[in-house]
Amino acid sequence: MTKKILLVATVQSHIAQFHRPLAEVLHAHGYEVHAAARNNLAEKNGLQLDFVDKVFDVRFSRSPKSKDNITAYNQLKAIVDSGNYEVVHCNTPMGGMIARLATRAARKKGTKLFYTAHGFHFYDGAPKKNWMIFYPIEKFFSRMTDVLITITHEDYKVASEAFHCKVAYIHGVGVSGERYKPVTIEEKLAQRRRMGYSQNAKILLCIGELNSNKNQVMAIRMMHKVVAKYPEAMLLLAGNGPKQKFLEQLIKQEELERNVKMIGYVTNLQDYQHIIDVQISCSLREGLPLNIVESMLSGNPVVAGLNRGHRELIQDGINGYIVDPNDYEAMSERVLNLLDNNDLRKRIVQNAIIFAQDFTFTSVKKELEEIYFGK
């Protein structure tokens, strides 16, 4: 009989972006890997879920109030009950809750339920209501979980002390050390020529869905001080989302059309990592942001707003900089320090590259091997 494992998430782009290393580990052990999630790939500019053996389009909604989630529960329960899966491995808040409810009968027959928490909504500094609402929900659902996988040390500590299942920790979901690696100055300039960017301009990159949480407003306003010193400096905003028109208007209002460019959702971020000078991230909340690791591996210094995800990755002044997420003056000062001081930049980059090695595909696949197969 074919050995099968089902990956579940709210949307297919989540699986496509974050779970290739897990699929490779499972395939190496002779498993078929299936995926169940809502098909949103048309929104993601060519992103493909091409490393699994079968895909189910399940009508999940991110909103807990949506009636679509009742349909999703019925769809997923039918898939699980008929699929004879050894493991159902779920992710994301709604995908995780519905999968655990839908797998209750299958667990009685031997199916194991794994859940990867990509950042709990309750954490040090979170609003009290988050602890009052989300903590008891996650603790309750841990009774329907065999293995909970955490990707931050803070989440691991909270879960291992109080939840009702086995808890493991891994260094995120993995980043390709082949795609994201340092390039020489000559390679950087050649890549800029190919992509149509100035050889002399200082280029900054900010990655993320265009929404309030990612806080691109701070990134845009920060540019005034950078442009005052480097008139040709450019900020690239990578991503799409509900705030796009608002941000386009803000760029015009701030008279930064020449210095801020929205490049949309791109699937070749490694090319952009190879042309920039500094990456910035202004998010108010993060679980464990892969784009920060990608930048570190690529040899680019990072300046980020303070949140628990950035705190997990960045030691301020050692392998990057952390500032108040609403202090664009402080962010611009840190950016200028890195642009002005080559020795400082080299020290930060060297420390970041060493630190980021634990988050590569190679490292994370070993951790997943240990969790699944004890190797």
Image: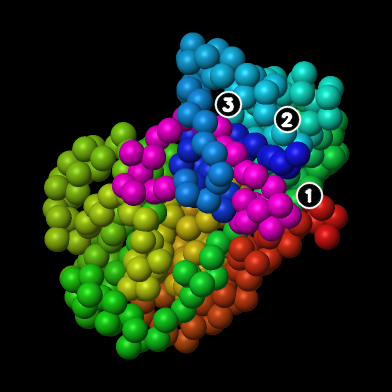
Of residue 158 and residue 338, the one placed in the foreground of this image is 158
Considering depth in this image, is 23 or 227 the residue closer to the camera?
23
Q: Residues within 10 Å of mark 1 (few under 14, many from 20)?
A: some
Asked where in the image residue 328 lies, by quadrant, the reply is bottom left
**Separation (CA) of disc 2 from disc 1:** 18 Å
Give the amino acid at mark 1.
Tyr
Residue at horizontal 47%, vertical 49%?
Answer: 50
Which amino acid is tagged 2? Asn
Disc on res. 84: 2
The residue labelled by disc 3 is 94
Identify which amino acid the numbered label 3 is placed on.
Answer: Met
Q: Quadrant of the N terminus?
A: top right
In space, the residues marked 1 and 3 are separated at their CA atoms by: 23 Å
Quarter assignment of residue 198: bottom left
Q: Is residue 123 visible?
A: no
On whether residue 128 falls in the magenta region, the answer is: no
Residue 69, percent from left and from top: 53, 17
Residue 317: image location, x then y, percent: 56, 70
Residue 242 to residue 269: above or below: above
Cα–Cα gap, marks 2 and 3: 23 Å
User: Would you say the residues marked 1 and 3 are in contact, meaning their CB atoms lie under 8 Å apart?
Assistant: no
Residue 95, position as x, y percentages in the image: 59, 29
**In percent of the image, x 52 and y 36: which residue is there?**
55
Secondary element at tag 3? helix
Is label 2 or label 3 in front?
2
Residue drawn at (84%, 22%) of the image:
108
Residue behind mark 1: 372
Q: Tag 1 or tag 2, which sits nearer the N-term? A: 2
Query: What is the span of residues highlighted in magenta in the rendered image?
Result: 21-48
